[in-house]
Image: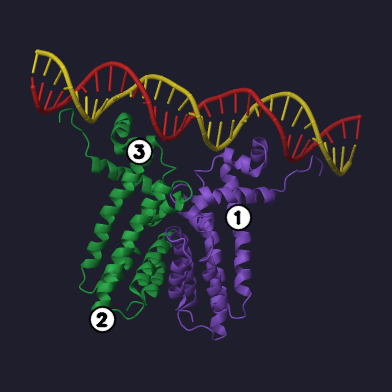
Chain colours: A green, B purple, C yellow, D red
DNA sequence: TTAATTTTTGACTGATTAGTATAGTATTGA
DNA sequence: TCAATACTATACTAATCAGTCAAAAATTAA
């Protein structure tokens, strides 16, 4: 294994790519945009990542891994997973304007690409299913511990929360407003506790 | 008023533009795509509509007007507005694959353009607020007539339904499946009746 | 020191982009 | 008949697009 070493950290520059893909979407992000944001050379981008599409795919992958870690971490900070889930959603309502406007990277990608690229659509879908499965895990746990008000099927409850997530990431662009978002989320979560 | 009359019906060709904008989004739709779908000439497009952006704006306007009519019509077919709202959502779950994949034209636009174009974002938002107001109207009516289970504020309930709408139009791309979508929708609507 | 290997660099490609320009045709009301 | 208007057709622009290429630079193993 010889050869000139990479001067950039791969994960670091993918995270910069994520930033711009997340804000502007796939189509509206040019390779030129990516290059200046990632601070690498055109040749390096194609040498290391292959194509714009492959870079996007890797962005979805990395973002999926890291964001799900953060989300599960937040939920786990409370003994009662229902409180964890509740706080996860409530916290999001007091984000800043730019964060509201970005919405969910996976939801955005699903919305933009579901008629344009089956592979990327499927990647975004899989990452959202992982989120659903986190909800499922903690809903199930709460149910076992008798912390759940409703007796509804856990899988359906998990998808209900997933749908809340998908919805709020559109709605928060209409209403980047703490009170409005909180009132919707609280009503939605009232089924749980 | 002299001059050669239009040989195409403006509303008709905007509807064709809507089709392609709705499926592919704003950025991924080229003027070439629009021209062949609308079956008009490049010159005519710019003469009549000004620019791609203006055509998109007019597409949002026309779609907003027509779709809200159809939605209100569906809800109104039942004496009990709650049944109307319920059926409106339940019906959507048995749509075909392509329909699921298209999602909501306004939601798609909000997702794609909220960081790219404030005017178009605002137009999409306004149209979704019109939908919220339809929900509000019929929720209020049901409340007056004692047909509503919950005593929750009507505006919040309307936004709760708007958020269901926004969410299900992402979730239906993940699960273009009648049973899955119905189970989510039914659970979500159980608060109403 | 040298050969092998890998990354960096920036110029380059051909295709496509949104939008314009021009000239000709069709249709109307005055 | 004529001025006004609107559509067709096509050629054109300048900018931007994603992606390629060959040569230089940096590193390691022999």
In this picture, residue B70 sits left or right of residue A137 = right
Tag 1 and tag 2 share a subunit:
no
Q: Mark 3 against mark 1, which lies toward the viewer?
A: 3
Tag of residue B159:
none
- Where residue C30 sits: x, y (%)? 89, 41
The front one of B87 and B143 is B87
Q: Residue at x 43, y 67 (%)?
A: B180
Q: CA distance from mark 1 to mark 2?
A: 50 Å
Above or below A122: residue B48: above
Residue to which mark 3 is pinned: A34
Q: Residue at x 45, y 47 (%)?
A: B116
Any part of residue A174 in sight = no
Q: Mark 1 against mark 2, which lies toward the viewer?
A: 2
For the C terminus of chain A, the image quarter is bottom left
Q: CA distance from mark 3 to mark 1?
A: 33 Å
Residue to which mark 1 is pinned: B61
Q: Residue at x 57, y 70 (%)?
A: B134
- Where residue A80 sits: x, y (%)? 23, 74
């Amino acid at each position: 294994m010889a050869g000139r070493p990479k001067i950039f950290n791969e994960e670091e520059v993918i995270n910069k790519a994520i930033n711009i893909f997340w804000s502007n979407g796939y189509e509206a992000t040019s390779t030129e945009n990516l290059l200046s944001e990632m601070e690498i050379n055109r040749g390096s981008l194609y040498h290391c990542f292959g194509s714009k599409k492959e870079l996007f795919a890797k962005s979805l992958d990395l973002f999926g891994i890291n964001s799900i870690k953060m989300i599960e971490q937040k939920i786990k900070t409370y003994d009662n997973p229902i409180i964890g889930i509740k706080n996860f959603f409530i916290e999001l309502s007091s984000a800043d304007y730019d964060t509201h406007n970005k919405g969910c990277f996976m939801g955005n990608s699903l919305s933009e690409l579901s008629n344009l690229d089956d592979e990327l659509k499927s990647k975004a879908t899989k990452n959202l299913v992982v989120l659903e499965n986190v909800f499922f895990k903690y809903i199930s746990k709460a149910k076992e511990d008798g912390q759940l008000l409703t007796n509804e099927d856990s899988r359906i409850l998990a998808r209900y929360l997933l749908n809340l997530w998908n919805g709020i990431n559109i709605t928060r662009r209409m209403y980047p407003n703490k009170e409005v978002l909180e009132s919707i989320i609280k009503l939605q979560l009232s089924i749980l506790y």
